[in-house]
Amino acid sequence: MAERGVDVSALPQEVREQLAELDLELSEGDITQKGYEKKRAKLLAPYLVQTQTLAPPPAYDGQSPGLSSAPAPKPGPSNSSSSSSRHRRTRRPHRSSGTRDERYRSDIHTEAVQAALAKHKEEKMALPMPTKRRSTYVQSPVDNCTPPDSSSSSDDEAVSSESAGPQQSPDTWINSSLHASSTSSSASSTLSHGESRSAQAPQSQQALPPPAPAQPPHSQPSALAEAFAQTRIDPGGGVGPPDVPSQAQARGSRVDLPTNAVVRGMSRGQSRSSMMETADGVPVSSRVSTKIQQLLNTLKRPKRPPLSEFFMDDQEEIVEVPQADPNTPRPEGRQIIPVKGEPLGVVSNWPPALQAALARWGATQGKSPALTALDITGKPLYTLTYGKLWSRSVKLAYTLLNKLGTKNEQILKPGDRVALVYPNSDPGMFWVAFYGCLLAEVIPVPIEVPLSRKDAGSSQVGFLLGSCGVGLALTSEICLKGLPKTPTGEILQFKGWPRLKWVVTDSKYLTKPSKDWQPHIPTANTDTAYIEYKASKEGTVMGVAVSKVAMLTHCQALTQACNYCEGETLVNVLDFKKDMGLWHGVLTSVMNRIHTISVPYAVMKACPLSWVQRVHIHKARVALVKCRDLHWAMMAHRDQRDTSLASLRMLIVADGANPWSVSSCDAFLNVFQAYGLKPEVVCPCATSPEAMTVAIRRPGVPGAPLPARAVLSMSGLSHGIIRVNTEDKNSALTVQDVGHVMPGALMCIVKPDGPPMLCKTDEIGEIVVNSRAGGNMYYGLPGVTKNTFEVIPVNASGAPIGEIPFVRSGLLGFVGPGSLIFVVGKNEGLLIVSGRRHSADDLVATALAVEPVKTVYRGR
């Protein structure tokens, strides 16, 4: 027997435990008798009585200073009996003398064994195994060098193996590791207790070692475990015994790791003894067939896709592409034909320019009232006659052209742009400033009064002033005192604004022109008359340039459509600096010598019925309001007595294009019809800063039937299709018409997105207008101008319908029966969800149409 001459009781404790477990395996039939004897012989081979030649480990290749290369003493059987003697030997590594003791194993062998052990951390142990505490700073070198994959005993290991890169077979990995170890400085890697075998010894010393002693499963190998427990790894990858200085570690050898190794940690209590080693050095499980089969199954898994494929656009796979619904309504009508308004009438007494109309009324009707301003209580504050309006405007024009700057170099020249900064409570000063700029041929740019340096929209207004090249601002003395100032008394430099020179336009600061000076009033041409500001959906404020001929033509078209007469009275509740408040209350009124009563917004908040009272007191013929003004007056009408609205022939609703305006108009009519308001008086209209007035309902004839309402399907509208619905359904939207196209204009409906293709008669689209009475461009922004002011519609085949350019109005609508125009929303408020279009105005209209008590629950 191989154990002849060996005293089993004198063997180390761990060897005796391994022999006991080997006996247990034989009794349980896990191994054959032949295998048992072979393993037992390998276990006892180092402890035989006969003399053996031991192979001391090599030194650190001379890379670590202070390490001796003297030959080591030959250990006898007593060298293995004492743990302390073994620890002493670890501090004196020596070179190999050519032979090898099986207790001293190569680093590659050790790494492979530990990698195989890592595969069994989930394996159920047959017997309790002794554990050994390890420092948290100690890490086994095998943790950094394991085979590319292991058994699929846990999901975590499987994921790690898949994410490590291209897979290799175990033989390839072991061979590459052996090759890397033999050609690198890992020959000095420390083995158990600091002893190692030289990997760079002469060829005669590189003979294959005898088979390693077999280890019973679930046992604790003594030398191997203690070596790994006491081996340190420096941060750079070097391995050394615990007592080697850090400088020696840094200069020592490194372990060459395979590039595709999977780094795995080893738990403190996991088994490190369930592996044995075959003759060719490949670590395998004690249950060979099962584990090898699992390893082969793992290697057969598909490779991980390359990194570039992870950045491919897989949106189609993640987000489900909505399929076209076969029940989606489709347009069925014919292609729309452009709608033409009535011809613009030619009247002999129409002036050649708007300034000429002011000059005529100032000279012939000097005492006729032009404007009445109200104070905060709603009572008349002052009345500006046409004579005063003309004289003050001339004084301002003379001052701007002759009294600013030096005599040789004037600040302002005709064609320059100036900002008009006036509060809503002072319309008289604004009128004088606006017409004074027109007479001086200076382009006015009306803006809002800045309230603070950090005003939310001040930077956007600064963008408008910068794009228009504004360097001078006109204001009143009261407004100038209210502007925010620096501690030194200077007006603050507002955020985003260009540097401005402020000029006060009160009459006492103006210079009376000489008798021989008269303002130059040319016939209306294509030069810019004024610039009106407009905020885009992104919040950018742009200036729409309106030419002199467009301003005059627009006044003529409004006069014809609204049938304005000379000397009428008009109550204006709107902002007089822009839109309908400017077009009707400042421009058209002067052209027709109309008396305008301006109701400031502050008065409306204090007394919502103030405009109704002004209509009653002045017997006004026309009123300019919004839906909010109708609603507020209706809510406060109980406080008013002896009110009559019988004098009104037109109640112009400026935001009548909103889908919810119909409910406000109906409710106001129901309440004030008892106060003399006639149903045919309500005249909604549709406007935009670019196209100006698009359509307006003409004042009706008493007793004539009212225009029909359009009850539309909300589902059809979401697909851009017009489908008539019944009013009793919750999915219906009722809209009112905004009248006919303006005189002298041509209008058509084009698709809101893509090329400006003509829509069909039952299709929703954007309204585009061709007219002399419209904006010319976004001042100073030629790139944005082309897409809005130079649109040429095309037919279904893509051919242009003509050469004349149209202007986008930004309004979404359709042409109904009798060429009536219906507006259902704005392009800026269009929401597209899952391919369906929803208008922000429709949402508001739906919320206002439902009964909150029945529909909206508390807390929703």
Image: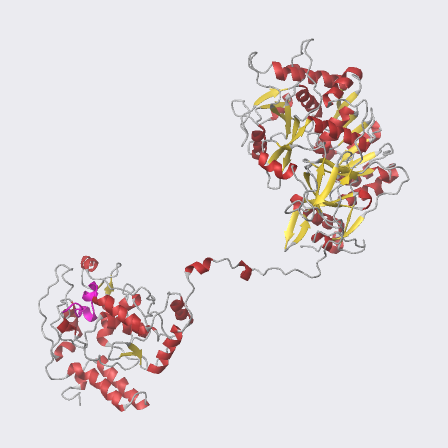
Q: For residue 88, what is the image quadrant?
A: bottom left
Q: Residue 427, position in %: x, y?
A: 71, 26
Task: Answer with left or right where residue 36 lies relative to residue 404.
Answer: left
Q: For residue 773, what is the image quadrant?
A: top right
Q: Residue 75, position in %: x, y?
A: 11, 76
- Residue at 79 percent across and 51 percent down: it is 711
Q: How would you classify the magenta stretch by its main secondary structure? A: loop
- Residue at 24 percent across and 60 percent down: it is 234
Q: Which residues are magenta?
A: 183-201
Q: Quadrant of the C terminus?
A: bottom right
User: What is the residue that sits farthest to the top in this orientation?
Assistant: 515
Q: Nearer the viewer, residue 548 or 660?
A: 548
Decide: is 131 above or below 33: above
Task: Answer with left or right where residue 360 lies relative to residue 44.
Answer: right
- The figure's colour scheme reads secondary structure
- Residue at 31 percent across and 81 percent down: it is 286
Q: Exactly how many numbered labels are in the figure?
A: 0
Q: For residue 510, what is the image quadrant?
A: top right
Q: Tell me if residue 92 is in the magenta stretch.
A: no
Q: Residue 695, position in %: x, y?
A: 76, 38
Q: Is residue 132 visible?
A: no
Task: Answer with left or right where residue 278 lies relative to residue 612.
Answer: left
Task: Answer with left or right where residue 625 lies relative to residue 536.
Answer: right
Q: Quadrant of the N terminus?
A: bottom left
User: What is the residue that sits farthest to the right in this orientation?
Assistant: 703
Q: Is residue 716 visible?
A: yes
Q: Nearer the viewer, residue 386 or 84?
A: 386
Q: Nearer the viewer, residue 701 or 24?
A: 701
Q: Residue 57, position in %: x, y?
A: 15, 70
